[in-house]
């Protein structure tokens, strides 16, 4: 290991600190070039993320400077009502690794987690798949060196669909089964679907509906939209309505940042358990892809991720031509009084 710079200085990252934010964005851009395939960071999206946290979550953003330059970054996500702090970003400039900067950032993360009253830290580490390109083993070695262990939470499979190599719409969108009809909407969920979308999202279509929680569930959909709008993201949705009951039986969501016209993110797809087995998941995704391409004709690459034990959704993705690229493995360590 080379000597750790002696002048490391931790600085909170605030959206209105233009100079530090500019250096942070440069760091993210340098990292994107050196790292696994990902959509290039969009500056509007990243600066927006400093102002607009995901629902029921507080973000604590920091950079570490040496010789007046940002050399690393840390984002701690603090979901409400859990004992856990999640490391969403822990990055060291590619030219300055193996000098102890990562270890220093991790020590800072532990101190912050303790300050926020959290007893555990979690992190996601990118690892290779046998069918995908080799990945840097450094992050897993680093996680182990910090004392973290692999969590037994199923890993995520990160997948890409390249529309220049595979056209899932070559045979058109399948017919909608009798008794159902499709609806579409944009970034803002229409009032009539705000409760059902929140319920489907939070329950993944499985848990029974609890009327008493509806207020929270409405605010979930609205908070999510607020975050998207604040980050300059646009979204496109297709829902399926069960005609006999008038209920929303499922929906799917694709979003994209202001920048990177070719890239989009396939987000949540959920079909209520009472309506599974009719091919609605694949129908929703294909119909929504057609809808997306009508509004965003430059989109060529879609990414998505699913828990690797979510075999039905991974099968739907494979049918569309999504290819597994890498795995997102969860690591965990405890935070004690000495941190
Ligand atoms: N290969 C093997 N071991 C490694 C590697 C590597 N490439 N990188 C770090 N380690 C281990 C070593 O044990 C090292 O100690 P040593 O150098 O004395 O042998 C120890 O981790 C600490 O290394 P640092 O020098 O403090 O780490 P660095 O500043 O290089 O940053 C980091 C490591 C953050 C993983 C960097 O490579 C990076 O930014 N990667 C991309 C982002 C990323 O994957 N972050 C996820 C981190 S996982 C987590 O937060 C728990």
Image: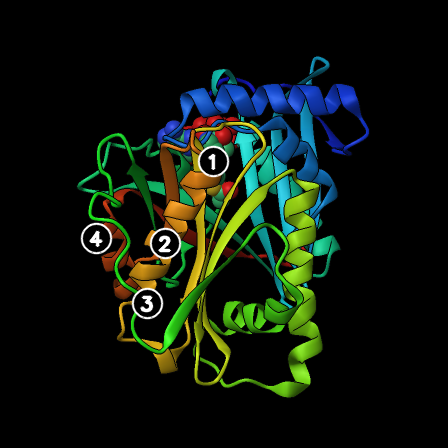
Label 3 or label 2, whichever comes before in sequence order:
3
Instruction: Say whether residue 77 is left or right of residue 202.
Output: right
Label 4 near label 1: C-beta < 8 Å? no
Label 3 or label 1, whichever comes before in sequence order:
3
Q: Give the labeled residue for mark 1.
A: 296
In front of the other: label 1 or label 4? 1
Q: Position of residue 149 (x, y in %)?
A: 41, 54
Quadrant location of residue 80?
A: bottom right
In this orientation, which residue lies closer to the viewer: 291 or 226? Answer: 291
In this orientation, which residue lies closer to the viewer: 327 or 251? Answer: 251
Label 1 or label 2, whichever comes before in sequence order:
2
Instruction: Say whether residue 55 is left or right of residue 245.
Output: right
In this orientation, which residue lies closer to the viewer: 137 or 146? Answer: 137
Residue at mark 3: C-beta within 8 A of ligand 1: no
Q: Give the labeled residue for mark 2.
A: 287
Q: CA distance from mark 3 to mark 2?
A: 10 Å
Instruction: Say whether residue 145 is left or right of residue 281.
Output: right
Q: Position of residue 180 (x, y in %)?
A: 38, 73
Report the label total: 4
Label 2 near label 3: C-beta < 8 Å? no
Q: Secondary structure at mark 2?
A: helix
The residue at the point 47 percent across, 36 percent down is: 296
Q: CA distance from mark 3 to mark 1?
A: 23 Å
Question: Label 4: how many residues lie within 10 Å, few (<14), some (14-19) or many (20+)?
Answer: few
User: What's the coloring here?
Assistant: rainbow
The residue at the point 63 percent across, 65 percent down is: 83
Question: Label 3: how many residues lie within 10 Å, few (<14), some (14-19) or many (20+)?
Answer: many
Question: Label 2: how many residues lie within 10 Å, few (<14), some (14-19) or many (20+)?
Answer: many
The residue at the point 69 percent across, 58 percent down is: 223
Q: Give the labeled residue for mark 3.
A: 280
Q: Give the labeled residue for mark 4.
A: 319
Q: Splitting the image into four quadrants, where does ligand 1 fall?
A: top left
């Amino acid at each position: 290991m080379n000597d750790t710079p002696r002048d490391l200085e931790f600085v909170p990252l605030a959206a209105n600190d233009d100079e530090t934010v500019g250096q942070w964005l440069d760091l993210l851009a340098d990292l994107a070039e050196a790292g696994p395939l990902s959509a290039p960071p969009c500056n509007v999206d990243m600066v927006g993320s400093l102002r607009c946290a995901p629902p029921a979550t507080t973000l604590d953003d920091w950079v570490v400077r040496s010789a007046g330059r940002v050399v690393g970054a840390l984002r701690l996500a603090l979901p409400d009502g859990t004992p856990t702090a999640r490391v969403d970003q822990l990055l060291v400039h590619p030219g300055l690794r193996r000098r102890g900067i990562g270890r220093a950032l991790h020590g800072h993360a532990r101190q912050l987690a303790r300050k926020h009253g959290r007893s555990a830290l979690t992190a996601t580490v990118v690892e290779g798949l046998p069918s995908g390109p080799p990945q840097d083993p450094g992050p897993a070695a680093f996680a182990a060196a910090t004392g973290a262990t692999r969590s037994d939470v199923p890993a995520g499979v990160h997948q890409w669909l390249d529309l220049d190599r595979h056209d899932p719409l070559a045979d058109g969108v399948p017919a909608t089964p009798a008794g159902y009809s499709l609806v579409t909407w944009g970034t803002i969920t229409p009032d009539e679907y705000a409760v059902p979308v929140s319920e489907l999202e939070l329950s993944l279509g499985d848990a029974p509906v609890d009327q008493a929680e509806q207020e929270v569930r409405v605010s979930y959909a609205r908070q999510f939209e607020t975050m998207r709008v604040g980050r300059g993201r646009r979204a496109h949705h297709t829902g399926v309505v069960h005609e006999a009951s008038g209920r929303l039986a499922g929906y799917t969501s694709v979003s994209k940042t202001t920048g990177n016209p070719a890239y989009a993110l396939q987000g949540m797809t959920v079909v209520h358990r009472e309506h599974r087995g009719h091919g609605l998941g694949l129908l929703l995704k294909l119909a929504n892809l057609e809808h997306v391409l009508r509004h965003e004709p430059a989109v060529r690459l879609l990414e998505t991720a699913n828990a690797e034990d979510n075999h039905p959704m991974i099968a739907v993705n494979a049918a569309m031509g999504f290819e597994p690229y890498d795995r997102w493995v969860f690591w965990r360590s405890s935070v004690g009084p000495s941190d």
